[in-house]
Image (cartoon, coloured by chain):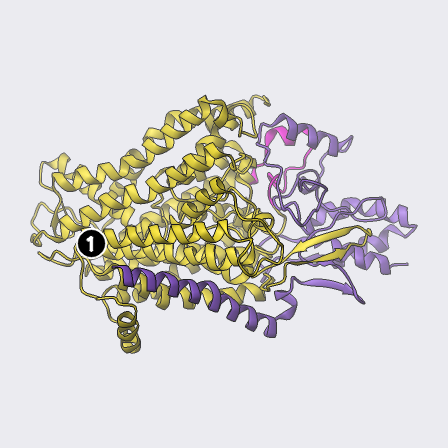
Amino acid sequence: MTLIGWAQIALVLGIAVIAAVPIGRWLAAIAEGRLGFLATFDRALLRAAGVDPAGQSWQRYLLAMLAFNAAGFALLYAILRLQDVLPLNPQGFAGVPPFLAFNTAISFVTNTNWQAYSGEAAMSHFSQMAGLAVQNFLSAATGIALAFAVARAFVRGGLQQLGNFWADMTRVTLYVLLPVALVAGLAFVAMGVPQTLDAGVTATTLGGAGQTIPLGPVGFQLAIKHLGTNGGGFFGVNSLHPFEGPSALATAFQIILQVVIPFGLCVAFGRIVGDVRQGRALLAVMVGFVLVATLGIYAAEAGGNPLHLAAGVAPELGNMEGKDVRFGQALAALFTATTTGASCGAVNAMLDSFTPLGGAIPLFLIQLGEIVPGGVGSGLYGMVIFSLLSVFVAGLMVGRTPEYLGKKVQAREIKLAMLAVLVLPAVILGFSAAALNIAIGSSSLANAGPHGLTEMLYAYTSAAGNNGSAFGGLTADTPWLNTTLGIAMMLGRFAYAIPVLAIAGSLAAKPRAPEGPGTLPTHGPLFAGLLAGVILILGGLQYLPALALGPIAEHFAMIAGTTF
Amino acid sequence: MLRPLLSLLLGSTLLLGVAAPLAVTAVAGRVMPEQAGGSLIRQGDRVLGSALIGQNFEGDEWFHPRPSATSTAPYDASSSAASQQGPTSETLLNAIRERLGDSRNVPADAVTASGSGLDPHISPENARAQVQRVATARNLPATQVAALVERSVEGRELGLLGEPRVNVLRLNLALRQLR
């Protein structure tokens, strides 16, 4: 670790936090329907689309969300299967096979962007642009719409309505995601990311050999991939590809894009509920987790692999297997912490080749529930769930009925919150254990020993957490993994969102309870500390046995000089 | 519910999936044709490669890039790939030992496979360690080759971001001009 490395981390994270303030204010304005000069256009557009912007009950909001996502899945599945007869297929790729198309369509609709294919070898330009990238926008907008609905539950005393899904989704897409993506896409091209409809060029290298260089409309897709915390790469190696991460500046810009909306939604939350300090407390917890995780990854990776150092590798550059030179260990660590904390899942360093502890941290960040800072929208509503659990735990300690932001938190909310929080460990641990114990699962492993266990655990963690990053050695394109990972992604997204919306509906219907002397303030350092503790204990503790068998065992094996 | 669903899904596919990327492609192609087209390096009609994509160089007379794990051959740009070997992998340790040979204290990037398999850069230390071999093979004074390496070192971006590095293709192109 170097001082200049820390300066890079501080600068990039600092810019992200500062940029989150104006974005958060704009998101709050959209959630509250304060559209300014866009209001006339907005009315006309919604009318043309047949949207009645009146408020919806939580059930209707949920139904609209599920129907829209199901239709999006069907359309994307069809595009992938039929890409050989659709336009813009200069590479002449065949249609995507059924299991892979199922997995990929689920993956992009749930904002996971797990990829069992390699983009430059499987996806036509049309599939990338009109199929995958469209869901990059819509899945992100879906998440933010859900966050709006949850935030509104705390302002509407006695109302049954959470807003309108169609209006929320459309406004977020058109007034936030699209304009930022257009500007960021062009900025990426300026940094060296290709944006063309050509299939590629064949170069004749200095050595005289041929080199086929694939190209495509990468820049624009790259922008929404990060802004929407999607993470699905145009190329197989994602943001490590020199066309998808051409420079340290580009990687820094990607880091900022992938956290700015999750951070910004905290700011928006504070404004929507009428107390900006509430948003700040959530933001502080998120930034704290990101910083600690970055420190851990940076220390582990910059320290190098003792087995390799003993063989004669110089220690200065740290562990360079699976990393490119241009980013450096500091930005690789910050990128890794933010992409796994934020449910983005893009990578600028190959996690499978991280040191055991360096790889355990991104794994654990996803397992905490994708809330620090979490995906766009899902991060905020996940944090609200954990805030409810925190006030409940505090209420138990002092024997009072807990309340959060003026709403009494009662048995129904806590039961639903626990239901949501338990989806993740059930899916992750259940599927991982099954896959490791049957040959059609375990035959996909690339690495032996405890690292193999981590590889499989990471896959289901990433799928259920809707992250999408991978320990990439795993051969994921098999019917078993395509199917079970697809189911894990679906459960992680929708089996979580349903109880969350039910909680929002139930809280929205409650009258505002006046603050009393027994009310726990939820904006100060005391609450932030409590929240962080509850996230660690309720979110993380159940994974410790699995982590002990995987990365922790491997760490001690490595120190002892054991290889597998 | 059917009308908003269909109109918003199809409308957004046309806007976000067709109109917007085509507009960005048109603007980028007009304003930044070099970058939009893949930062290609040409010599006459011949495309030598991309400044951003590494190439394989073998033989003592060239500076060597990092080991590459792309599948059919090193630096196969049509299928980017990493080794995906874990930290306690016997396969990886053996590969590193083989690349090290009898050398010790070797810069890490010289004996580890990059994440993309297409890393265009090596560390300045790695380039310096190759100066003597290249100079001998080309019958050039080592000081001249060393000076070229120093001129080729790119500093941190904006003076802060990333790491100092040397673009191997550009270095070898410049190397051809030395005499």
Position above or below: A495 against A209: above
- Identify residue type, mark 1: Arg
Give the quarter of the figure containing the C terminus of chain A: top right
Q: Which residues are magenta?
A: A302-323
Instruction: Give left or right: position of A335 versus A308.
Output: left
Query: Which residue shows up at 62% across the image and 58% down it?
Result: A90
Which chain gets the yellow colouring?
Answer: A
Residue at mark 1: A60
Q: Quadrant of residue A191?
A: bottom right
Q: Residue furthest front?
A: A85
Residue A36 x, y percent position in the rendering = 28, 76
Residue A303 is one of the magenta-drawn residues: yes
Of all chains in the rendering, the one displayed in purple is B
Instruction: State the SS at label 1.
Output: helix
**Residue A297 in sight in this render:** yes
Residue A394 appears in which quarter of the rendering?
top left
The N terminus of chain A, quarter of image: top right
**Which residue: 11% across, 41% down?**
A410
Q: Position of residue A405 (x, y in %)?
A: 16, 52
Tell me the residue at 53%/34% (across/down).
Answer: A474
Q: Where residue B160 sits: x, y (%)?
A: 57, 58
Left-right relation of B71 to A48? right
Chain holding disc 1? A
